[in-house]
Amino acid sequence: MTDSLPACPECGGEYTYEMGELMVCPECAHEWSPTEAASAAAEAAAAGVIRDANGNPLADGDDVIVVKDLPVKGAPKPIKSGTKVRSIRLVAGVGDHDIDCKVDGFGPMQLKSSLVRKA
């Protein structure tokens, strides 16, 4: 196979496959149209909108909830799924970490918007 398929926009899984006109991720069962995903990503990038895991737009001062356990380097335990983070700030962080916040029990850190949902 000479051409590579795009990674899943939901979970980043690399084992995607084509099913008719749709792309499918076997890891999270997400289905999407490559043409619609490209146009939606271009619109979001042009508008500078940062969205949560469910696709809701985020703004400074919003409260978010972590959607999966997040391991933290140097901490004995992860940030648990369901942890509420108050008063986030949107930034252009390191890599794709675009939320600057303070997590109770862990201190200040940056999170990925794809790992939180709006509270």
Image: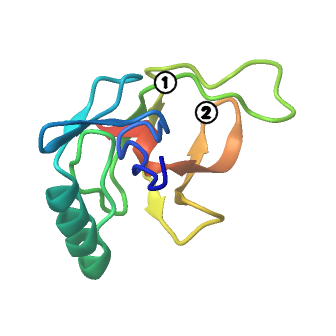
- Which three-letter amino acid code belongs to the residue tagged 1? Lys
Q: Measuring from the top left, give residue 77's x and y in whole percent.
A: 75, 18
- Residue at 46% over, 33% down: 15
Report the mark closest to the observer, 2 or 1. 1
Q: Which residue is mark 1?
A: 68
Q: Measuring from the top left, give residue 58's x and y in whole percent.
A: 29, 56
Q: Residues within 10 Å of mark 2 (few under 14, many from 20)?
A: few
Q: Which residue is mark 2?
A: 104
- Which three-letter amino acid code belongs to the residue tagged 2? Asp
95 with respect to 19 (left or right) = right
Give the quarter of the image for residue 37. bottom left
Q: Which mark is residue 111?
A: none
Please say if 61 is above or below 66: below
Residue 104 or residue 109, whichever sits in front:
109
Give the quarter of the image for residue 118. top left
Label 2, label 1: how many angstroms apart (C-alpha)? 16 Å
Residue 58 or residue 6, whichever sits in front:
6
2 with respect to 23 (left or right) = right
Give the quarter of the image for residue 20. top left
- Residue at 36% over, 63% down: 60
- Residue at 60% over, 46% down: 102
- Residue at 27% over, 65% down: 41
